[in-house]
Image (cartoon, rainbow, N blue to C red):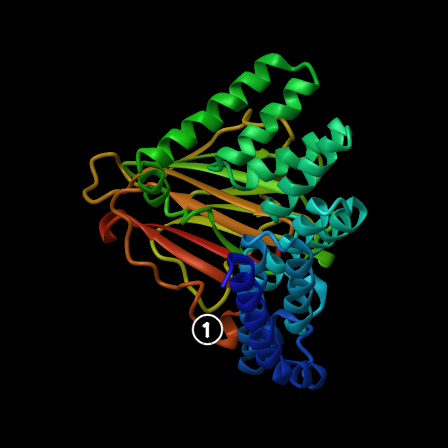
Amino acid sequence: MSGRSIWLEVASSAWLLATAFAASAAGQSEALECNSLETAAAPPCAHLLQETSKWYAAASAFEQRGARKLALDTYSRAVASAGRPIELFLAHTLPALALLRRGLMHRELGQVPEAMADFIALIDADRGNSEARHERARTLLDLGKLDDALADSAVAVWVNPYSSDFHRLQAQILGRLGRREEATAAATLAEEYELSVARGLQGLKVSLFSISPLFFRQRFLLQKECQQDDRHVLSLRLDRGRVSVTPSYAGPAGTMAVEEAEDRLLFVMGAEPCQVRVILSKGDLPSEAAPATNDGLRKSLGRQSGALNIEREFYPSSTYGCASGPATFRVYWGSMDDAYLVLHQARVQARLDQPTEKRRKALLYTRLFGEQACRIGLQVWKGAS
């Protein structure tokens, strides 16, 4: 039997197998309403993703063998089998991956408008989808739309700063724009991360910052509710009972404010309805209700990136068991993530993957740093008050 015959037999088997698997999903998706974050996470809707996974595996097999048209059609079936609206196609979920791969198949088949439509749909659903941003940037570069390509590339690199491919594409765009020094810097970063992968070091660097492989991300609102929001950053450093915080913006929109008190710092990040409160305090924080705010202490933070440094000494430097190290906290488009390299981090009291009681629904998470004698607490609450 020739190699082509074997391939056709395997392809046909995979297609028939995927069709059989998906038959039950078609009936289920019609009866289910998986139209919110809560319902999509419930067992009936989550079960649909098993069918999506089977379609996705079949499409991947076709793609690996160069059958792009067949792969495209099968990725479309994977997308349809998820049984949820596009606004729930969040980055790194299987439906979003299927739609991304479909867009790539469209592009490889010369169907650029269809490819762009898939990338745009993913970004509309999740503006922090770095892979969709990267692929749209690559397509825009091919179309000669350099400024638009650079804007997408900049977001992709910001969301995932550890991808050599993202930095390499940004270097190409900057080079085409004649921005040689910036292009060289981006190319150097791309080479650094590529070498890190070759040497097995990137995994170590990533794991040290607790971002496997990205910043640990939690989505708390849908993109459609946060289109006017933007990227906000808190860079923290803990040092023997002292906290130093540098707030900054990574985009043209958004807003931040701070309340400074003797025993705490409270930052309000984002615009309604996408605001969160980030609270740094001396000692443990209650989890039953958010600490009361004080509008008399609140002041807006300017847009001079990195110009302001806020410090608070919660404990004398001689106190035993204090935490030390840097941390980064980011809020953007209905999502938040964090990365830490902090010694003496205490046990996490609330985890993102555990259900919380109704009274604590607004409490997104808690982290504790240092031992009890030098405890510094960090809480994140949904909403500004």
- Rendered residue at 50%/53% (across/down): 217
Vertical order, 355 against 120 (above or below): below
User: Horizontal and vertical percent for residue 354?
Assistant: 42, 70
Numbered circles on residues, count: 1
Q: Residue at position x 49%, y 55% from top?
A: 380
Of 159 and 372, which appears nearest the observer? 159
Type of amino acid under label 1: Pro
Tag 1 residue: 355
Tell me what residue is drawn at x 51 percent, y 59 percent: 2
Residue 91 horizontal side relative to residue 124, left or right? left
| Image location of residue 138, percent across then percent down | 67, 36
Q: Position of residue 248 (x, y in %)?
A: 57, 33
**Image position of 1 (left or right of 326):** right
Q: Name the residue nearer the viewer: 76 or 230.
A: 76
Please report the residue visible at 26 percent of the width from the left and 42 percent of the height from the top: 343
SS class of the residue under badge 1? loop
Quadrant of the image containing the C terminus: bottom right
Q: Say above or below: 94 vs 328.
A: below
> Residue 82, percent across and down?
63, 71
Compared across the picture, whether 65 is left or right of 179 comes to: left
**Which residue is outermost to the front?**
1
In which quadrant of the rendered view does residue 252 lie?
top right
Residue 231 visible in the displayed image? yes
